[in-house]
Image: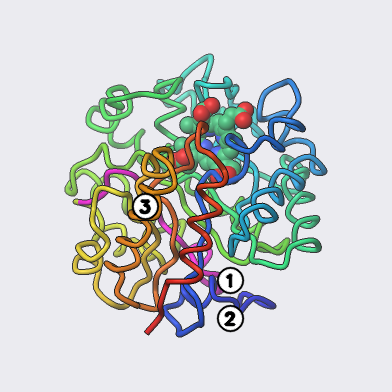
Amino acid sequence: MSAGRFDDHPFIRACRCQPHDRVPVWFMRQAGRSLPEYRAIRGEGTILDAIADPDLSTEITLQPVRRYGVDAAILYSDIVVPAHAVGFGLTVTPGVGPEVEHPFRSAADLDRLRPLDPEADTPYVLETVRQLVTELDVPLIGFAGAPFTVASYLIEGRPSRDYANTKRLMFTDETLWHALMERLADMAITSLRSQIDNGASAIQLFDSWAGALSPPQYERYVLPHSSRVLAGVADTGVPRIHFGVTTGELLELIRDAGADVVGVDWRVPLDRARARVGDEVALQGNLDPTMVLAGVDAALEGTRDVLARNAGHPGHVFNLGHGVMPAVDPDVLSAVVEVVHREGTVN
Ligand code: CP3
């Protein structure tokens, strides 16, 4: 199977550990937040309103591609869009994140998570994807939230530090836990497949908060479900990236879940991540986002360190170790892209 017209693009080739001529780079959270041109058009209302407007979402997705010359676009959407679209009852509060009025508590709440019908429930997402693939000359990355990370929002009701309610449900009612994870996995598969069907060339599964779990916990409560999501899009042939934060101890398991590309946060030096996952899988990362915030000197020193630690392995997609912070100077990111393209080497 193929990713279509971008099969020879450095980003797609790097995801597949195939030789190519330059290290590809894109940034998590490159769309929105720090760009003045984003703030100029974003408008009032929540991000969910902006996502429901395909012309606006298309433009926001294109802005960082134009400005930075990155090698991939990430769809402007959010991991909570499918749950919102089936009527779970959530909003995304600016500066806070997703908030749920009635958090998930019991088996009765499963009824609030009916199957997603992407054409009917999220037509605006698919329209945005279709518009983007006609305008982009780099691959479009579609994405979904992994079951654990989406569950953490539905159960906690707001961003959390310790995921105490989520883990309590996991440990006290394993049957309900797995039932919830199955619904969220189905939702992720359906959403990802609809993005791929409409032209996305790669996908990323965001399990941002999986690092809250120990390896045995991850293996028992989360891995089977994330693994099913990744397997559920395998036949499409598009590269699959699997990312979480504070996952140093989980990297082997995240690889075992079945991704083509393992996202690495900044806490694990890239050479150490490579030693953990082996040579057969690509790595994505992992410049510390605060080095970008610190200015051009720190950012470029960090960039060169990441490139050196990758040591020319063809399976490397340069990225930050997590998202772009709102206060960064966009010119620093432009300088990072230039150095990755100029100095990055592929064996
Ligand atoms: O640039 C991109 O990465 C593309 C768009 C994107 C958004 N959210 C837009 C957004 C993507 C890929 C996401 C995924 C997402 N959403 C994740 C996984 C990635 C990660 O950062 O770990 C998570 C955990 C969420 C949940 C979420 N949504 C959070 C934690 C927040 C932050 C709140 C804030 O204001 O900082 C949001 C809101 C959100 N999603 C914003 C954007 C641009 C900011 C709010 C806005 O512009 O109104």
- Mark 1 vs mark 3, foreground winner is 3
Would residue 113 be seen by someone viewing this image from the given angle?
Answer: no
Query: Which residue corresponds to the image point at 56% horizontal and 53% vertical from the top-left?
Result: 334
Outermost front residue: 297
Please, what is the three-letter code of the amino acid marked with disc 3? Leu
Q: Image quadrant of residue 318?
A: bottom left
Please, what is the three-letter code of the amino acid marked with disc 2? Met
Q: Position of residue 82 (x, y in %)?
A: 61, 39
Question: What numbered label is drawn on residue 1?
Answer: 2
Q: Position of residue 34 (x, y in %)?
A: 58, 36
Question: What numbered label is drawn on residue 287?
Answer: 3
Q: Image quadrant of residue 201?
A: bottom right
Q: Is residue 284 left or right of residue 3?
A: left
Q: Which region of the structure is painted magenta?
A: 231-248
Q: Is residue 74 left or right of residue 129?
A: left
In-front residue for pair 293/190: 293
Asked whether 238 falls inside the magenta stretch, the response is: yes
Q: Are marks 2 and 1 in contact (CB under 8 Å)?
A: yes
Quickly name the residue at label 1. Answer: 236
Q: Is residue 253 left or right of residue 297?
A: left
Query: Which residue corresponds to the image point at 44% horizontal and 56% vertical from the top-left?
Result: 319
Asked whether 232 falls inside the magenta stretch, the response is: yes
